[in-house]
Every structure is written in C-alpha cells, then in structure tokens.
Image (tube, rainbow, N blue to C red):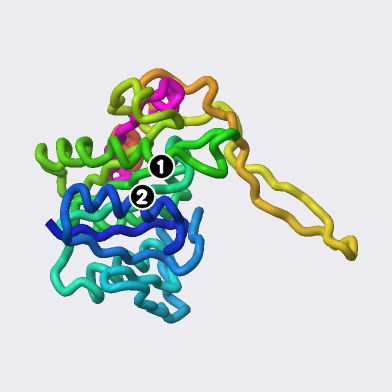
C-alpha cells in the first residue's frame, strides 16, 4: 500500500512526524508532501496566482510553498509516479470538530484526496490549556493504526472522507470510539481582537473563541471528545441539502 502523508501545520510540525509513524505502521511505502510553512485555516484554497516552489527534504519527503490542497495535487499528480492507495492528513495540532472542518486545511487536504479518488483521512489531536505546548501525540500514534485498518478493511465510499479526532488524554484513558455527527458550538467561533501598534495605528487579529463546546449535543464529535472518546465522522463531498432542495423544487417549479 502506497501512502501519501500531508498536513496544514507545515513540514517541520511534530504532528507530521506523528502521522508518518502512523503511516509506517500500515506500510513501508510512505511519501510526505507538506506545506513549507504553517497553512492552518486556509481551508480548500488553491494557489492559482503564485507558482508552487518544490523543495526535496529527504528521499520521500517534500515541502511545497503552497496550501495543503496544493500539496495533495503535487503529490498525486507530479511527485509520486504511481497514485497513492491512501492519503493521511495530519496529525493536526488541535481538534478539527464542529465548525472547524469548514476552515481546516487538514480536512481540506483529505477532501482533495477524496476528489482525486483516493481513500482519505483527516487526523487531529485535541489539546487543552495544560497540554497546548505538548499535545499528546502518542495518543493518536497508539490508536490510529488499528482504527484505520478496520475502516479500510470495510471499504470507503467513493466520495466520502473520514474525519478522526483523538481526545486530550493518555492512550490508556481513551474511553472508546464514537461514530459521531459534526457538532455545533453554543457560541460564536470567531471574534476580532483589536490592538494598536507602537505608533498608535489600529490592527486586528481574527481570534478563535474557545470553550464553546460545553453544551455539545449527544452524538456529536464535540460530545465524544468531552467524554475522552475518539470521534469518527464521515464527511461527504456532496454538500446538497436534499430536504430543502425538495422544498425549493416544489416552490420554484
């Protein structure tokens, strides 16, 4: 099995090394193509107006000056002579649950792999304030291989990726696996942090509001992580809302 590993945190991110360990537990034919710098929050963007600069770091390890989506396309269409059998994106530093999947470059890379017809997984390791500087990568490393093998043995639908989040706890403290729906936070995800520079000129950061998962509904990815469970959520390429489409058809036709 040929595996392509990528991420959105960049070629030097420790989570990428964790993902490589996970991939090597499944195969010895592992290729890494990751962004040259941190691309968190770029979602499914493509570099259409700038050239992609490619740098070889090691025999099967490449850095691309571009987005995670760029990396997947470069890996599949240019670097790897034969298409991969599997794409692993991550391990992201921090969870990708609820509305995170809209912004996540980690999820977007797996999404692009799915577009290209390759079974793809997005892997993320949750952290808390106390583990922010050193997320528990070993939790993902220990639990991911068996989980991936089980899902792959069942078979992946053509237009579906799987988003997996590992809880912020020690491997032995994981309380099982929850197949969960995408959650929704009970507060606004984004806020504007207004500041002033040394000359008194205003500038702004887009900041993420944390702690908005306290009221996570049962069965959601947020609830699973709150319960120290691994959340597994299948995501479809087709974003059509069929119930409302049926209503619109009756209204407009």
Q: Name the residue under label 2.
A: 18
**Looking at the rendering, in which quadrant would you find the C terminus?**
top left
Name the spot of residue 143 as percent of width and height, x first: 28, 35
Between residues 241 and 27, which one lies in front from this camera angle?
27
Residue positioned 22% across, 53% down in the render: 24
Badge 1 element: helix
* Residue extent of the magenta highlight: 221-240
Name the spot of residue 73 as percent of width and height, x first: 29, 68
Q: Name the residue under label 1.
A: 137
Label disc, if present, on residue 230 of the rendered structure: none
Work out whether residue 98 can be spotted.
yes
Relative height, residue 129 to residue 10 (above, below)? above
Horizontal side of residue 93 vs 59, given as left or right? right
Outermost residue toward the right in this view = 199
Residue positioned 23% across, 68% down in the render: 76
Q: Residues within 10 Å of mark 1 (few under 14, many from 20)?
A: many
Residue positioned 32% across, 28% down in the render: 180
Badge 2 element: helix
Determine if the magenta segment contains residue 231. Answer: yes
């Amino acid at each position: 099995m040929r595996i392509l590993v990528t991420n959105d945190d960049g070629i030097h991110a420790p989570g990428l090394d964790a993902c490589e360990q996970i991939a090597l537990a499944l195969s010895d034919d592992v290729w890494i193509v990751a962004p040259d710098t941190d691309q968190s929050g770029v979602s499914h963007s493509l570099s259409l107006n700038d050239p992609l600069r490619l740098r070889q770091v090691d025999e099967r390890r490449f850095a691309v000056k571009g987005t995670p989506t760029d990396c997947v396309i470069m890996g599949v269409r240019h670097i790897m002579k034969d298409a991969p059998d599997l794409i692993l994106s991550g391990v992201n530093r921090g969870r990708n649950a609820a509305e995170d999947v809209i912004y996540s470059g980690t999820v977007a890379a797996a999404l692009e792999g799915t577009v290209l017809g390759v079974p793809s997984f997005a892997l993320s390791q949750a952290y808390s304030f106390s583990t922010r500087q050193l997320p528990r990568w070993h939790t993902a490393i220990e639990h991911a291989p068996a989980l991936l093998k089980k899902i792959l043995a069942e078979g992946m639908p053509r237009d579906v990726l799987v988003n997996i989040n590992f809880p912020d706890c020690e491997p032995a403290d994981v309380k099982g696996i929850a197949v969960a729906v995408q959650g929704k936070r009970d507060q606004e995800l984004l806020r504007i942090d207004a500041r002033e520079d040394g000359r008194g000129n205003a500038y702004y950061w887009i900041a993420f509001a944390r702690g908005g998962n306290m009221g996570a509904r049962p069965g959601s990815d947020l609830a699973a992580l709150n319960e120290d469970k691994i959340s597994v959520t299948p995501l479809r390429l087709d974003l059509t809302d069929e119930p409302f489409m049926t209503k619109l058809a009756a209204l407009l036709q």
